[in-house]
Image (spheres, rainbow, N blue to C red):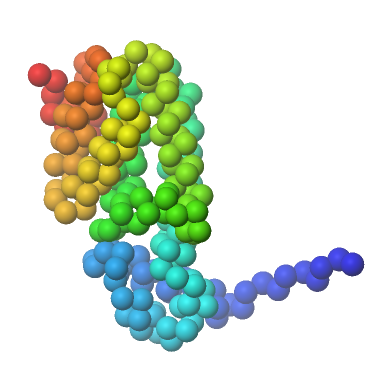
Amino acid sequence: MAEPPRRRPRADARRNKDRLLAEADAAFRQEGTDAPLESIARQAGVAIGTLYGHFPNRRTLIGSLLRERNQALFEHGQELLTSPAPTQALIRWVNAVVEHAAAYQGLAAVLADGLDDQESELHASCVRMTDISDQLIVNARAAGALRRNVTGADIFALMNAAAWTREHMHPEQADRLVALTMNGMLSQAPSNYGTAERGGAQNP
C-alpha cells in the first residue's frame, strides 16, 4: 500500500522556522553558539516549544544554519581535489575550513565534538569535511609538498588553532598563523605564499 503524500509545512510554520534561523544566526554571531535558545525564541516571537518543534536540540539548529555553507565548502573542496597544484589546493582548503569553523564563536569546538560523536546531527558533515582534508593531504604528500614528519593530525590541529584565533582575535592574525605554520610544514613553500594567499607573512 502506497504511503500517503507528505503534507507541505503550513505557511506560518515555515515563517516561524525562517525567523528562528534568522534570530539564531544573529544571536550566535553576537554571543557565540552558547547563546540562550529561550532568547532566540523570544526574539523570533515564538514560544520555546515552537523552537524545539523545529530544532530538537542546539546541534540541530546549528546544523540547519550551516547547511548551505557546508554545501558551498564541500563543492569548493571537490574542485580543489582536481587541482593540478596540490600544495596550493591544500593551503586554500585549510584557509577555507578555518573561515568556515570561525563563523560563530565556539563553532570550532562544536564541530570537533561532532566529528567524535556519531549520534551528533553534525557528524556526517564533519566526516565529509575530514575526508576531503585527508584526500588533499594525500595529494600534497604524493607531490612531495609536505615534510615527511608532518601528519594529518598536525594539519587538523592547525585548522582548529587558527579557527580559535579567528574567533577571538583579528582575522589577519589567524591568516598569519596559517601562513607561518604551513610554511614550516611544507617541504617547499610556494613562492607567492604569504603574499597572494590571504595576506599572511612572507617566506623567510
Residue furthest toward the right?
1
Q: Image point 18% across, 42% down: which residue?
A: 174
Q: Residue furthest bottom?
A: 47
Res 42 quadrant in image = bottom left
Whether 181 is drawn above or below 46: the answer is above
Instruction: Work out whether residue 185 can be spotted.
Output: yes
Q: Quadrant of the N terminus?
A: bottom right
Q: Is residue 176 left or right of residue 129?
A: left
Q: In this rendering, does residue 70 appear at all?
A: no
Give the residue at x 55% y 80%: 12
Residue that sits furthest to the left in the current view: 204
Residue in the foreground of this view, choosing between 40 and 124: 124
Q: Nearer the viewer, residue 160 or 39?
A: 160
What residue is at 48 percent from the left and 24 percent from the top?
82
In x, y percent, where is residue 175? Answer: 19, 38
As drawn, is 84 to the left or to the right of 3? left
Give the percent coordinates (x, y) of residue 26.
31, 67
Query: Which of 200 and 94 lies nearest the eye of the viewer?
Result: 94
Q: How many numbered discs sit on the rendered protein?
A: 0
Quarter-of-image position of residue 36: bottom left
Q: Is residue 161 above or below residue 60?
A: above
Q: Residue at x 41, y 27 (%)?
A: 136
- Vertical placement of residue 30 versus 71, above or below: below
Tell me where residue 112 appears, x and y as whole percent. Answer: 36, 50
- Relative side of 170 to 60, left or right: left
Screen quadrant of the C terminus: top left
Q: Position of residue 43 (x, y in %)?
A: 34, 80
